[in-house]
Image: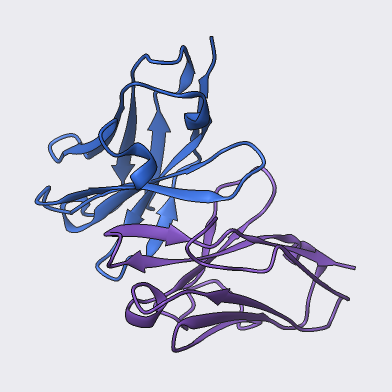
Amino acid sequence: QVQLVESGGGVVQPGRSLRLSCVASGFTFTSYGIHWVRQAPGKGLEWVAKIYYDDSKTYNGDSVKGRFSISRDNSKNTVYLQMNNLRDEDTAVYYCARGDGQHTLDYWGQGTLVTISS
Amino acid sequence: QSVLTQPPSVSAAPGQKVTISCSGSDSNIGNNFVSWFQQLPGTAPKLLIFVDDRRPSGIPDRFSGSKSGTSATLDITGLQTGDEADYYCATWDRSLSAGVFGGGTKLTVL
């Protein structure tokens, strides 16, 4: 069965960096794009980033442009979210999700909590 | 402010029908497929509707989606207490080159 498992969350000080991982299994990893979506405490969903199935393109949301970058290692069935210069407002649960060509996010991980605090 | 506009909350009695709207623009809903997600408290979002009006396997036909122009709609019939959740619409915005979500709608089954 399709599974996505996020890891790497934790408590980090403002201005520091963190790298999240999303390990996929149960499907042909190289056939799908992967998205990161976050949810601040008590708030709605916010799209963060996307990487194409073949690593040819990446996109980032305005609120993280220049600070976050998405990458993938197809040999490890893993997508990463490198988060630099973290701010208080980056505190959220971060989900990775499988995406197809129609921007359908059909399978989601359980999420990993990132807390920015001094 | 979300790019896609949803009502903050809707409510109806068990067995009734509820409609959740999602309003956007030509750069998003008007030219891209819409998905709908259900999020129960403390859990990850779950795909309910994709490519405007299709249901993934396992989603009951009480849930249906439609789209007209720059607006999309999620209908839920035969409401059950287990349907109480937050519902989100989503699509791609070609002007922003970014994914976009609605602000979410909290469904209360009275």
Q: Which residue is at a point 51% across and 66% down the rendered structure image?
A: B4
Q: How many marks?
A: 0
Side (left or right) of A54 relative to B62: left
The percent position of residue A6, horizontal first and vertical second, equals: 40, 34
Looking at the image, is B23 positioned above or below residue A87? below
Q: Which residue is at a point 12% across and 36% down the rendered structure image?
A: A75
Side (left or right) of B29 relative to A57: right
Q: Colour of chain B?
A: purple
The percent position of residue B66, horizontal first and vertical second, equals: 52, 86
Looking at the image, is A31 positioned above or below residue B18? above
The percent position of residue B70, horizontal first and vertical second, equals: 45, 82
Q: Which residue is at a point 12% across and 47% down the rendered structure image?
A: A55
Q: Nearer the viewer, residue B103 or A38?
A: B103
Q: Nearer the viewer, residue A60 or B1?
A: B1
Give the quarter of the image for residue A23: top left
- How was the colour assigned to the protein in this rendering? by chain
Q: Nearer the viewer, residue A5 or B31?
A: B31
Side (left or right) of B83 relative to B92: right
Q: Colour of chain A?
A: blue
In the displayed image of the protein, which residue is found farthest to the bottom? B68
Q: Which residue is at a point 55% across and 48% down the rendered structure image?
A: B44
The percent position of residue B84, horizontal first and vertical second, equals: 76, 62
Give the quarter of the image for residue A33: bottom left
Give the quarter of the image for residue B17: bottom right
Looking at the image, is A47 positioned above or below residue B73? above
